[in-house]
Image: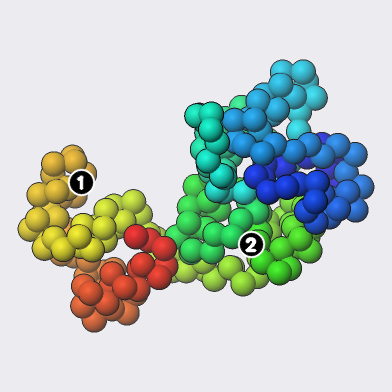
Amino acid sequence: MFKKVLLAEDADYMSSGIKVALENMQIPIVQYAQYCDEAFLKLKKAWMDEEPFDLLVSDLSFKENINQQRLESGEALIAEAKKLQPTLKTIVFSIEDKPYRIQQLCNELEVNAYVWKSNHGQKELKKAVQSVYNDEFFITPQLAHALRDKEAFEITDYDVFLLKYLAEGLDQKEISEALKNKDIKPSSVSSVEKRLKLLKENFNANNPTQLIAITKDFGLI
C-alpha cells in the first residue's frame, strides 16, 4: 500500500470520514492541506527532501482564502504537481459530475482516478486508492458514461468557443468574425457551419436553441 499520501481538501479533515477511511487502509503517513498553495509547498518540500509523496488526493474547488493564492483550483494543483513529480499518482475527489469536466481531467491531466463525492464517496475513495496502487484506473461507476461519451465524440476547446458564442446570440457570420479576432482557426463561416451541424447531430439537437440547452446540461457552457 502507499506509504505517504497528501490530501488537499478545504473541509474539516479531522472530523471527516476521509481521515478514518485512509487510516483504515494502514497508510503510515497521511498529510493534509487546506489550500492548493499549501499542498504544493508540501509536495515540493517532500520532493526536495527526497521523501516524496506517493499519492495526491485533491478536491477541485476550494473556499476563497483571504491571502491571494497562486494555485486556486485542484486542477491547477494537479498540473503543477505533475510537472514537479511526473510519477506522482493523483486522485480527484469532487462533487463535480459534468461529463466535459471529467473528460478533461481524466484525459488531459491523466489523473489516475475520479471519485464523486456522494453518499458512497468515502467507500469509493478507498476502492480508488487500492485500484491506483494496483496501477488500475478507477472512476465512480455513475460517472463512467462521461468517458464512454468521449470515445464516441471528441469535444474540443474550439467546440466550447462555438457553443459559448452561439449561446450569446451570435449568428454563424458573427461567430466567424469573433474567431478571427481571437486568431482561432478554422474561422471561416463554412467551418463554423459544418462544426455546429456536427455538434447538433452528436447531441441529437434539432436547432441551435436545443443544442445550447443540451450542452449546458453537459456542463460544456
Say which mark, if any, is on residue 53.
Answer: none
Density class for disc 1 (Cα within 10 Å; few <14, some 14-19, many ≥20) is few
Instruction: Report the residue at 74% width, 51% height from top.
Output: 132
Rendered location of residue 125, percent (x, y): 74, 57
Residue that lies at the very extreme toward the front in this rendered image: 66
Amino acid at circle 2: Trp
Rendered location of residue 40, percent (x, y): 63, 30
Q: Is residue 47 above or below residue 180?
A: above
Q: Is residue 13 above or below residue 204?
A: above
Choose between 5 and 152: the one closer to the eye.
Answer: 5
Q: Is residue 189 visible?
A: no
Q: Is residue 35 above or below residue 15?
A: above
Rendered location of residue 189, percent (x, y): 10, 58
Question: To which quarter of the image does residue 9 belong?
Answer: top right
Quadrant placement of the C terminus? bottom left
Instruction: Report the residue at 84% width, 55% height from top.
Output: 21
- Residue underneath mark 2: 116
How far is disc 2 from disc 1 in space, using C-alphas? 35 Å
Disc on the earlier residue, 2 or 1: 2
Q: Secondary structure at mark 1?
A: loop
Amino acid at circle 1: Lys
Q: Is residue 174 visible?
A: yes
**Number of disc labels:** 2
- Residue underneath mark 1: 185
Q: Is residue 172 left or right of residue 42?
A: left
Rendered location of residue 155, percent (x, y): 37, 59
